[in-house]
Every structure is written in structure tokens, then in C-alpha cells.
Image (cartoon, grey):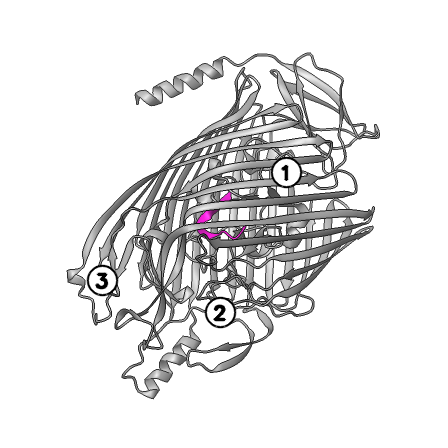
């Protein structure tokens, strides 16, 4: 209580010390040819106050202290100008840029995409809407350095530079999405791209702000469910689309309104679809017979999402609250159960086979998510803004077998993030506190990971300073990570016929880790529209519960999983969680960028040295329901391979690039690609399921109200495989889009048609756990209409 009183007193003192200055700053925004720029955004840094320039480029904005104005406009490089109460008749000149500039909310320091030191990609506006797919992985996989895990089109998570799952943090407005997608690839992410304003992909370690789970990168889905700008009139949007490859229909709508600082938001999505069609491929069934298929069974989806939010936005104070719900059923392809048919008659065997065929396993996902925001802009001498975000998520993923719940995965997460943006002399930065508590549970036959509670408390500091054309950025984070679980200890042996549950021993497991992260980087704007950026970072990550404590059959991947905490001796697994070391990453990035004129590019080189890299390794054993763990030699056909998490030193390195050329005012050509090499050190082999390299090109052409886009992407052969995985042949995908703008008075409407995989190419995704059973969809026509008012 004393501590809370001291904190409250300190905050009150700061609030009372703010300056009482008040003035109107006026100015004019012009381009490099001295022509006025209309509708440029002029924003007071650290406050939720902004205005637009008029037809003559003129603006007037209120300030109450010495401030900084942030002036931005699409297709122009942002400008930042220091102002005081005596500033007036400002002349602001914006230079044109060949790429869109947007503020990256995940950066925490209000940087736009061109000012970021670490590599970042942002999908927003029409580009996001045109590329939107039912899953985040499929939506983002065309970006350089980004691929997808692909467990069918209904469950596909992003892979960044060869890293996924526990190493890529998926957030919603800066707070963890808090689903169970890190537990297994068949668990869909709970973030929906249709309601997003923009999606940000931060490549490389982002652990300073987002913790040890972001050692590979961050995907931040930004929406407006808690409005942070005042809405003065009723606005909305609606969209309908139909996909032929899965006979799916999608309907989405959004409404926003406000009055005198109070704002309201609503959005909802309804999506339903059948199993998706594929080019002809062959697959071996359980009996070894080869079958020909033209679709992937059990890939249907039926989903509903609803989001409500409200806020009050004043000159200094912003406070808001939101609620969101997800209710989704989706099929799990390749989800097969291994029945013991020994002793059955032919009729009983056939009956079991018919039941499995008639009632495939599917997932029922439910999520309730509450978020709150309190932000206060002080504008005193050193503190600019105090920002608090809180969230609570109740997530459930149930697998329905024969009409009944077989296994349920639950995750209840409470999270809070307090940021204090400040200035010390010439340094501008942020210090913060991050709290997260995740209560995970799994109940049922396939609960291969025991229930656990994971709690983190962290302090972090991020500072930047300009030295002429060079901006440097320094940061550090210390994180206390604690995991608690109850382990049921029994041994799986080759001669074990039946487990006597009365002899099982329950072991209380509690372990704490202290994770340290630090980074240093710089960006040099060596001439207008050109920059070089470099950064080095050190990040530490402890194992998640699934990596540490798994002990059970994971049907979705067709494997028996054992965690780092187990030791195998004489075909018996013993729980001995001793000397578990953190995964430690040292990452170097080097970026070259040009974004002015008709020609622009971004080229990123990266090298990631990881000690104690956690990954699943084939033990050479198999698991049989009757005999437990045994040698693969002579084992039953129903036995599955045993994979155990282990830790070894690894290195990942590669290149990403994206170049564009404005051939004419109506035509633009883009070229993009990436290459990632991932292997264990000391010549111990390659890492498994690393995405294939890709190279693509895109042509955009505008014919007045008609916009045309043609994209071709080649995925190369993946021959860098482990001893227990197969090579994957390359393939080429061609996609086309046509958008037509309709003039309907006050409604901005758009008709569109997308044709994906025009040539009906058969492609298998190397990073997929079920690549041979679930190739990519065949030719798909997507028709749609969207409107805004």
C-alpha cells in the first residue's frame, strides 16, 4: 500500500508540474515544387490532437507547451518540427516518396516505416484488403522474409526468417493475442485480418518491448476497436466476397461514430466455406494404398467475430474499453486416430473405419477478449505521455471427435503494459513495465502438454538520439519468467502393457528464469530518401511449457512428443528437468534503403547466432499404445515416431529484398524475394521445416478507375533437409487482381476480382507438418464488392 501511495504521489506531482502555456500555431504544408498539399495530417507529438491542412495547405493547431509537430501525408516523407507558443506562419516542405509511409504502432516511439532501424513491413489500406485471407500466415506469406506454417488454409501461422511458433509473437494493438497457436500448428491464430486497419511485421528480435516470445519477430494487428482519434460523424464499411475454390462466403461490416469526444466502434465478420479444391495429387492411406485426390478433406470453416469498443478522447486524456468475441468451427486436415484393431472382426474393423470417415475431427474455437486503454499527455519538461494498456483473454480450443469433445485446450491470460514516454536533454525514449499471467490447461486424450501457469514481470528502457543525419537507438530489458506445473510421472517402456494410474506420482514443478535483452542500432539518412540502418541485439528465451513438459501423443502432427525435461534411458522416459539453459540469440541486421524518386528498394541482410536452440529431434524410437516406447525396427504399423525437444547451437542467415520502379505514372514494377539458411553448428545438419527460398515480381497498372495487378512468385526446391524429412519440389504461382472504383455519391464503392493460382499449379509447402496431405489450393476466383461511407 505504501508503494502505491508513493507512486500516486509521484504521478500527481508530475501532473501538477505541467506547463500552462496555450497558443495557436499556424503554418502551410507545401511539396518540393512549392505547391500546397491538401489533407496532410498535423499531429502534436505525445497527444491525441491532430488537424488536416486545407485546400491551400494551411493549418492551425492548438498547443499548450513547447512541442513537436509531426506532419505526414501518403506518398511523402514525414516531417517533424519543434514548435513553441511563439511559433507562427510555419512553412513545411514534404518530399515525395516512392513508397507509402505509415506510422508503425509496434515501434512505441511513433516512428514511420521509413524511420525504423529494424526491418519492418506494413500492410494497410487497399493492399491489405486485397491480400486478406482467413489466416494471418496466408495473408502475410508474400512479404519478403515471411512464410506460413500452413496446416491447411484454416490454420496457418506466420514464419519470420525461418522462425515461428514460440519465437514469433502475435499481438493485437500491442498486447498478446493469447491463443494456443504456439502449442501446435493445427491451432489457428485468433487474429482476423479483415477488421484490421494495418498489420505490422517486425523482423528480427523484438524482445525489448514484447518479451522473450518475440526472439524471432512480432506480428502486430492494429485495429480501431478502441478509437484514439475523435470521430465527428457516422462512418462505416461493408464487404462481401465469394471464393470458388472452397465455395466460401465472407461478409464483414464496420461502423464508427462519435460526439463531443465520445467515440464508438463496431465491427463483425461472418465466414463459411467447404473443403478446398486442389490440383490432382496422390497420397498413401494407412494401408499403403495410393489414392488420387482433388481436394483436402476436413478443411471447412464456419466463423463469426464481433468487436465493440468505446473511448473518450480529450486534449490530454484518452480512456477506452473494448470487447471482442470469436466463435469458429474448422476442420483439422490429416487428423487421424490410431485404433487398435487387433482382435476385431472384419465387420467391427469396417464399422470403425466408416465412423472415422463419417465424422472427421474438427476444432471449435471460442475467445472472449477485453482490452482497456488509459493515456495521459502531460507535456511537462521531461514526461510526455503515460500510457497503460490492459487485457484479459479467455481462449478455448476443443477438438470434437464423433460428436463429442475429445480434448480441450484452454488459455486465460491477463496482461498489462505501462509506458512512460519521456525526454532527457537530447534523448527521447520510453521506459515501461510489462506483466503477463497465462493459465494454460489441456483436458482429454490428446492433452500432451500438462496444465501450467506462466508469469512474467519485466522492466524495459528504450532511448534514441539524433546526431545530425544519424539517429542511434539503445535499449535493454530484464524479465523475470516463472513457470509452474504439476507433472504426472510414469514411465513409458517397451514392455509396459498397462499403466497403473494408482501408482502414478505427481511432481510439483516450479522454475524461474531471468532473461536479459539488449540492443543497439543506428540509421544514417546520408541523403534525402536514402538510408543505411544497422543493429545488433542480444535476446534470451526460456522454454515454453510445450517445449519443456510435453509427454504425449500429438495426433495433429502424427508424432509422440517429449519435452526438454525428459531423459530417455533404455526406451524409458524419466522426468529430470535439470540444467535447462535459456535459448540465447545474437542477431545482426544491415539494411540499405532508397525511397525517393521513381526507383526504390529495401535490402536486408541478417545473421542470427543462437545458442541452445530448442527444436524437435527424431529419437529413432516409436510409440505404440500397447507397448509404449520401443525401437522402430519391428514395431506395429500404428506406432508413431517419437520426437523430443532438444537444444543445440544453431545459426540462421539470409537476405530479403523488395525493389520497385515507377515505369510511368500509371505503371509500376516490383521485384521481391528472400533466402534463409538455417543449420546446426559443428556440421550437425540442417534445421527442420525451413521455408524454401522465393523470388517474385509484380506489375501494377492503373487505367483511371480500374487498377490491375499481376503477381508471379517462384518457390525454389528445398533440399536442405534433416535426416527424417523429405525434399520438396519447387513451384510457381501466378495471381491476378482487378479493382474497379464505382462512383455512388457519398459511398466509395469498389468491385474486385482476384484469380489465385491462375495456372492451377500443384505446390507443397515444405514448412507444413502435413505437406504431403495438404497441398496448396488450386485455381481460385474471388469475387467481391466493398463500400465505404
- Quarter occupied by the N terminus: top left
Write the residue at 44% across / 14% down. Answer: 13
Q: Is residue 710 left or right of residue 178?
A: right
Q: Which mark is residue 113?
A: 1
Q: Position of residue 537 (x, y in %)?
A: 50, 37
CA–CA distance between discs 2 and 3?
35 Å
Q: Determine the residue located farthest toward the bottom in the rendered image.
A: 346
**Lower position in the chain sequence, tag 2 or tag 1:** 1
Vertical order, 248 against 683 (above or below): below
Vertical order, 508 against 756 (above or below): above
Q: Which residue is mark 3?
A: 491
Q: Secondary structure at mark 2?
A: loop
Q: Magenta residues, as a range?
A: 161-172
CA–CA distance between discs 2 and 1?
40 Å
Q: Determine the residue located farthest toward the front in the rendered image.
A: 682
- Quarter occupied by the C terminus: top right
Q: Which residue is mark 2?
A: 298
Amino acid at each position: 500500500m505504501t508503494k502505491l501511495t508513493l507512486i500516486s504521489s509521484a504521478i500527481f506531482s508530475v501532473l501538477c508540474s505541467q506547463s500552462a502555456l496555450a497558443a495557436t500555431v499556424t503554418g502551410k504544408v507545401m511539396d518540393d515544387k512549392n505547391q500546397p498539399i491538401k489533407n496532410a495530417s498535423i499531429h502534436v507529438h505525445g497527444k491525441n490532437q491532430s488537424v488536416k491542412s486545407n485546400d491551400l495547405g494551411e493549418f492551425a493547431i492548438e498547443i499548450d507547451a513547447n512541442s513537436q509537430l509531426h506532419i505526414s501525408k501518403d506518398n511523402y516523407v514525414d516531417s517533424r518540427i519543434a514548435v513553441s507558443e511563439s511559433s507562427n506562419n510555419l512553412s513545411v516542405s514534404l518530399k515525395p516518396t516512392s513508397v507509402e509511409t505509415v506510422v508503425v504502432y509496434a515501434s512505441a516511439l511513433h516512428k514511420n516505416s521509413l524511420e525504423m532501424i529494424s526491418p519492418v513491413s506494413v500492410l494497410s489500406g487497399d493492399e491489405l484488403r486485397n491480400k486478406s485471407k482467413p489466416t494471418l500466415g496466408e495473408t502475410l506469406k508474400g512479404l519478403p522474409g515471411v512464410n506460413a506454417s500452413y496446416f491447411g488454409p484454416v490454420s496457418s501461422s506466420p514464419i519470420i526468417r525461418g522462425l515461428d511458433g514460440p519465437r514469433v509473437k502475435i499481438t493485437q494493438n500491442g498486447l498478446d493475442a493469447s491463443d494456443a497457436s504456439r502449442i501446435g500448428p493445427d491451432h489457428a491464430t485468433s487474429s482476423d485480418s479483415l477488421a484490421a486497419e494495418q498489420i505490422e511485421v517486425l523482423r528480427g528480435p523484438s524482445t525489448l518491448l514484447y518479451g522473450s516470445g518475440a526472439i524471432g519477430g512480432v506480428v502486430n494487428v492494429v485495429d480501431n476497436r478502441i478509437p484514439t482519434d475523435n470521430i465527428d460523424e457516422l462512418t462505416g464499411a461493408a464487404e462481401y466476397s465469394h471464393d470458388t475454390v472452397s465455395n466460401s462466403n465472407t461478409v464483414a461490416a464496420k461502423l464508427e461514430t462519435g460526439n463531443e469526444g465520445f467515440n464508438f466502434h463496431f465491427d463483425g465478420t461472418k465466414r463459411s466455406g467447404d473443403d478446398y479444391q486442389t490440383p490432382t495429387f496422390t497420397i498413401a492411406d494407412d494401408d499403403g494404398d495410393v489414392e488420387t485426390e482433388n481436394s483436402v478433406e476436413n478443411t471447412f470453416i464456419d466463423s463469426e467475430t464481433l468487436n465493440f469498443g468505446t473511448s473518450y478522447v480529450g486534449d490530454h486524456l484518452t480512456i477506452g474499453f473494448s470487447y471482442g468475441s470469436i466463435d469458429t468451427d474448422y476442420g483439422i486436415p490429416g487428423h487421424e486416430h490410431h485404433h487398435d484393431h487387433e482382435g476385431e472382426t472384419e465387420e467391427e474393423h469396417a464399422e470403425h473405419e466408416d465412423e472415422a470417415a463419417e465424422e472427421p475431427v474438427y476444432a471449435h474455437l471460442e475467445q472472449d477478449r477485453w482490452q482497456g486503454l488509459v493515456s495521459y499527455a502531460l507535456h511537462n519538461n521531461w514526461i510526455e505521455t503515460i500510457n497503460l494498456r490492459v487485457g484479459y483473454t479467455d481462449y478455448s480450443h476443443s477438438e470434437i471427435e464423433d460428436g463429442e469433445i475429445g480434448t480441450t485446450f484452454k488459455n486465460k491470460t491477463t496482461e498489462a503494459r505501462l509506458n512512460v514516454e519521456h525526454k532527457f536533454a537530447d534523448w527521447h525514449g520510453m521506459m515501461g513495465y510489462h506483466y503477463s499471467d497465462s493459465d494454460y490447461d489441456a483436458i482429454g486424450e490428446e492433452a500432451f502438454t500438462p496444465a501450467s501457469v506462466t508469469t512474467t514481470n519485466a522492466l524495459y528502457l528504450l532511448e534514441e538520439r539524433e546526431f545530425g543525419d544519424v539517429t542511434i537507438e539503445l535499449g535493454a530489458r530484464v524479465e523475470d519468467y516463472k513457470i509452474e506445473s504439476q507433472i504426472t510421472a510414469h514411465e513409458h517402456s517397451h514392455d509396459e502393457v498397462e499403466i497403473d494410474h494408482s501408482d502414478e506420482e505427481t511432481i510439483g514443478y516450479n522454475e524461474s528464469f531471468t532473461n536479459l535483452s539488449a540492443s543497439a542500432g543506428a540509421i544514417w539518412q546520408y541523403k534525402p530518401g536514402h538510408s543505411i540502418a544497422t543493429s545488433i541485439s542480444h535476446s534470451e528465451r526460456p522454454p515454453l511449457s510445450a517445449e519443456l513438459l510435453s509427454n504425449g501423443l500429438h495426433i495433429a502432427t502424427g508424432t509422440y512428443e517429449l519435452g526438454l525435461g525428459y531423459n530417455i534411458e533404455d526406451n524409458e522416459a524419466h522426468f529430470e528437468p535439470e540444467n535447462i539453459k535459456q535459448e540465447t540469440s545474437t542477431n545482426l541486421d544491415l539494411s540499405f534503403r532508397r525511397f525517393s524518386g521513381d526507383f526504390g528498394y529495401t535490402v536486408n541482410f541478417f545473421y542470427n547466432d543462437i545458442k541452445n536452440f530448442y527444436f524437435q529431434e527424431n529419437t529413432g524410437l516409436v510409440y505404440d499404445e500397447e507397448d509404449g516406447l520401443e525401437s522402430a525396427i519391428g514395431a506395429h504399423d500404428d506406432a508413431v515416431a517419437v520426437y523430443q525437444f532438444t537444444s543445440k547451437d544453431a545459426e540462421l542467415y539470409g537476405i530479403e529484398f523488395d525493389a520497385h520502379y515507377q515505369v510511368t505514372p500509371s505503371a509500376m514494377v516490383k521485384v521481391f524475394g528472400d533466402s534463409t539458411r538455417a543449420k546446426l553448428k559443428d556440421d550437425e545438419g540442417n534445421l527442420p521445416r525451413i521455408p524454401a527460398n522465393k523470388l517474385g515480381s509484380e506489375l501494377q497498372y492503373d487505367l483511371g478507375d480500374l487498377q490491375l495487378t499481376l503477381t508471379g512468385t517462384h518457390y525454389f526446391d528445398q533440399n536442405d533437409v534433416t535426416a527424417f524429412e523429405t525434399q520438396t519440389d519447387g513451384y510457381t504461382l501466378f495471381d491476378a487482381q482487378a479493382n474497379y472504383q464505382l462512383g455512388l455519391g457519398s459511398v466509395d464503392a469498389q468491385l474486385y476480382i482476384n484469380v489465385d493460382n491462375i495456372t492451377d499449379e500443384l505446390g507443397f509447402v515444405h514448412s507444413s507438418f502435413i505437406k504431403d496431405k495438404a497441398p496448396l489450393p488450386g485455381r481460385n476466383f474471388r469475387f467481391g464488392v466493398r463500400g465505404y461511407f
